[in-house]
Amino acid sequence: MVSLEELEAQVARLAKQNDDLEERVRELELQIGILTERSLRGSCSSCHMG
């Protein structure tokens, strides 16, 4: 049988993993927003770089 201490340690690890994943989701959402904004402005062939 699993001890209470082992369960608490596992819960703590999962909580940390969840926090890390939520932070990664926020980073990806920001990147998606940036890419969406770029695509709405037009493709690279129509930007000022060319």
Image: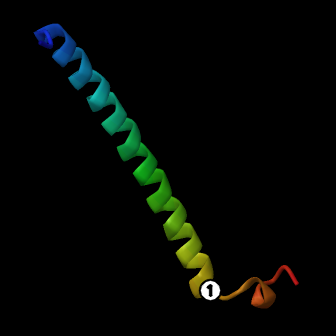
Question: Which x, y percent locates residue 43?
Answer: 71, 86
For residue 16, what is the image quadrant? Answer: top left
Judge by depth and name the residue closer to the eye, 36 or 11.
Answer: 11
For residue 21, what is the image quadrant? Answer: top left
What residue is shown at x 36% (from left), y 33% (from top)? 17
**Residue 36 to residue 16: above or below:** below
Count the numbered circles shown: 1
Question: Which x, y percent locates residue 49?
Answer: 84, 79
Judge by depth and name the residue closer to the eye, 13 or 40.
Answer: 13
**Residue 50 to residue 10: above or below:** below
What residue is shown at x 25% (from left), y 21% (from top)? 10
The residue pinned by badge 1 equals 41
Dot 1 surroundings within 10 Å: few (below 14), some, or many (20 or more)?
A: few
Q: Is residue 10 left or right of residue 38?
A: left
Question: Which x, y percent locates residue 1?
Answer: 11, 12
What residue is shown at x 48% (from left), y 52% (from top)? 27
Residue most extreme to the front: 1
Q: Secondary structure at mark 1?
A: helix
Judge by depth and name the residue closer to the eye, 37 or 29.
Answer: 29
Type of amino acid at the residue the image marks with label 1: Arg
Judge by depth and name the residue closer to the eye, 4 or 36.
Answer: 4
Q: Quadrant of the C terminus?
A: bottom right
